[in-house]
Image (cartoon, helix red, strand yellow):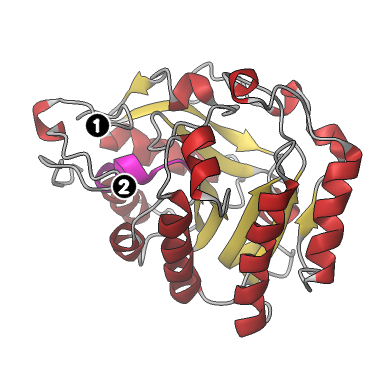
Amino acid sequence: MSTTFTIPSRCDLCPRRCGADRAAGRAGYCGAAGTLKVARAALHFWEEPCISGTRGSGTVFFSGCALRCCYCQNYPISAQAFGKEITVERLAGIFLDLQAQGAHNINLVTPGQWQPWIMAALDQARAAGLHLPIVCNTGGYETVESVARWAGYIDIWLADLKYISPALAADLSAAPDYPAAAKAAIEAMLAQAGRPVFDDEGILQRGVILRHLAIPGHTDDSFRVLDQMAAWNDAGPGCFLPSLMSQFTPFYQAAEHGIGRRITTYEYRRVVNYAMDKGLTTGYMQQKSSAQEEYTPSFDLTGV
């Protein structure tokens, strides 16, 4: 079975709206061109417990990214174009393979630059029996229009809110518009997904998880991120699950931007305490031991 879809000729899938003619094979700012590219597909056991469960999350890592985070732990695929070109039909088969392996869900990591391709693959896979919840694992740098197009395809949004400061977003992710774009996109996600819904095993079936990675030396901005999360929670108590992460590891170009160390226990504890003071008490936090390189998957084309 083949599916017809439109490859962007003036790409506007992300807030960069770079206008790349991907139909002609030209790569956009994100590094993605006209042929779908995937770096890894496997069961993943290190997401939040309601995502990974006991059998793992069926995770597919897509190549390319609209952000340029200097500390990205996935930089070989996000910034260095690592991955294998595959067809939409092969991606549909990967989804079905992961379901057959017992995955609780299909977890799309940084999928935004491949939205038309992935929608086509999901249509094919669903026609062949795919029935798992679909997770969009995103850095939060999305357009409201893109979020709307995912309606009917995405059940769970696993989204970052990285920064509130445009200057910090510019320095660490080359995206001064990140705070405004992420705020609007997350509000669209919350409206689309609704309150969290779990099955009898405690596995999330629908809803939003908002992640924040605490960055060394920038607890002041983390507090502002938590202020925003608290405002959403105050307006709709329990409308999302907060997830505070301590796993920052100084990968890639982090040291060149003044963050060449892991976060201290004191810094992370301050962030956690602030979240609790703000009423963000129903969610997740990490142990400091999560800041280890072995928690980063090996991008070796497993499952592709």
Which image quadrant for residue 276?
bottom right
Q: Is residue 269 left or right of residue 279?
A: right
Up/down of 257 relative to 279, above or below: above
The residue lying furthest to the front in this view is 167
The label shown at residue 14 is: 2
Residue 113 on the magenta segment: yes
Three-letter residue code for mark 1:
Gly
Which residue is depicted at the point 42% across and 65% down? Answer: 184
Does residue 230 appear anywhere in the picture? yes
Q: Is residue 119 left or right of residue 141?
A: left
Part of the protein shown in magenta: 108-117
Looking at the rendering, in which quadrant would you find the N terminus? top left
Residue 216 on the magenta segment: no
**Number of marks in picture:** 2
Majority secondary structure in the magenta region: helix
From the top left corner, tell me how far across and down residue 144 is, in percent: 34, 63
Looking at the rendering, in which quadrant would you find the C terminus? top left
Which residue is depicted at the point 48% across and 62% down? Answer: 183
From the top left corner, tell me how far across and down residue 81 is, in percent: 38, 19
Q: Earlier in the sequence, mark 2 or mark 1?
A: 2
Three-letter residue code for mark 2:
Cys
The residue singled out by tag 1 in the image is: 28
| Label 2, label 1: how far apart the Cα atoms are | 10 Å
Q: Residues within 10 Å of mark 1 (few under 14, many from 20)?
A: many
Q: Is residue 34 left or right of residue 283?
A: left
| Marks 2 and 1 in Cβ contact (< 8 Å) | no
Which residue is depicted at the point 16% across and 34% down? Answer: 20
Up/down of 103 relative to 67, above or below: below
Does residue 304 appear anywhere in the picture? no
